Amino acid sequence: MPPDLEGLARALSERLPGSVSREQRVADLTTYRVGGPISVVARVVDEASLVAVADALRRTPAPVLVLGRGSNLLVADRGFPGLGIVLAGTFEDVEIDLTAGVVRAGGAVPLPVLARRAAAAGLGGLEFLVGIPGSVGGAVRMNAGGHGRETGDVLVQASVFDLRGDAEALALVRVPADLDLSYRHSNLGPTEVVTRAELRGNADDPAACTARVNEIVRWRREHQPGGSNAGSVFRNPPGDSAGRLIDVAGLKGFAVGGAVVSEKHANFFQAGPDATAGDIHRLILEIRKRVAAATGVCLELEVQMIGFDPDTEHDPGMRT
């Protein structure tokens, strides 16, 4: 039986007035800026809002997609027939505790914002986060990383709210050992929302921290493209890089419709003004096929695919 999305939207609108939208373009919520509509989108600003969402889902089950900043996400042109969750409000708060050497941040905080604020306060060790265009919650979920470091290297603990949990056990605090962190992986399920995280840094000179942040930004601008993309499309194989393999296969600049492999970094696929999600999807499949033929390596996806063939997407959410 298909989910009762009309009923879900009504229930959420009663509990979260002004915070629920219907048939919202996912292009407005992701960095690829393509894709079809999400049936229902709820903007949640605090834990009470999440409790309301969990209650509505118990009564009217539906697939769930936690959007974050949409920087590692490709949704099909047909859209997502379920509930999209966008964090805001108190989930955008940042607290820097120099005495304890930690920063406590909401799940919606952009990683570049966190890195810059920590650096300005003299909390070092978090500068690498400035080069990751996602959110704190997304970084925990994907164990995001760059410049030789990963989120798990600095994570103290994360608060996780399970939309499928019992009313008495919706929110849990998890330490890295609970999350089964590995390369671009955690064990968080699709209905588990990272609401907050505590990250460990080290006291340092603010000017030195800021200089390191600026150097990472400079390096990123020199080596990675801007525009409409979702960062790295494929995971790096052990001991190698996906970008190098795509490059040696002669695929920089290769295009399908309005989607093209970046000339600057081959593991970044750009969406042009007329691109569709289908163009990017077909480009991904073609690049994977050609790299396998040229190198013998089958590249694994890093970008999350929603609404495509099951062989090329991650499970988008709760089953009904």
Image (spheres, rainbow, N blue to C red):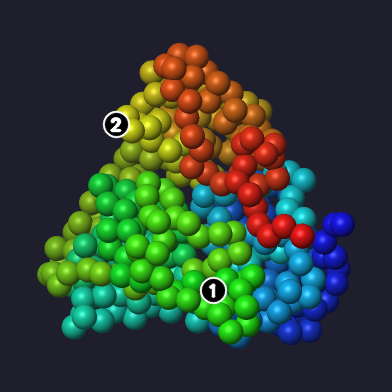
Q: Which sits earlier in the primary sequence, circle 2 or circle 1?
A: 1
Question: Is residue 262 in view from this perspective?
Answer: no
Q: Give the residue at mark 1.
A: 161
When asked about the image quadrant of residue 214, the answer is: bottom left
Q: Is residue 202 above or below residue 129?
A: below
Residue 239, numbered circle:
2
- Rounded to the nearest angstrom, the CA distance separating label 2 from label 1 is 35 Å
Seen at 33% across and 33% down, the residue is 238
Query: In the visual, does 288 lie left or right of 150?
Result: right
When asked about the image quadrant of residue 22, the answer is: bottom right
Quadrant (top left, top right, bottom left, bottom right) of the C terminus? bottom right
The crowding category of the residue bearing disc 1, from other C-alpha atoms within 10 Å (few below 14, some 14 to 19, many at least 20), is: many
Residue 146, percent across and down? Answer: 32, 48
* Residue sitting farthest toward the top: 294
Question: Is residue 55 in view from this perspective?
Answer: yes
Residue 75, percent across and down? Answer: 66, 47
Q: Nearer the viewer, residue 270 or 139?
A: 139
User: Tag 1: residue type?
Assistant: Phe
Q: How many marks?
A: 2
The crowding category of the residue bearing disc 2, from other C-alpha atoms within 10 Å (few below 14, some 14 to 19, many at least 20), is: few
Seen at 72% across and 57% down, the residue is 319
User: Tag 2: residue type?
Assistant: Gly
SS type, badge 1:
strand
SS type, badge 2:
loop
Seen at 68% across and 71% down, the residue is 42
Q: Is residue 215 above or below residue 245?
A: below
Residue 310, numbered circle:
none
When asked about the image quadrant of residue 198, the answer is: bottom left
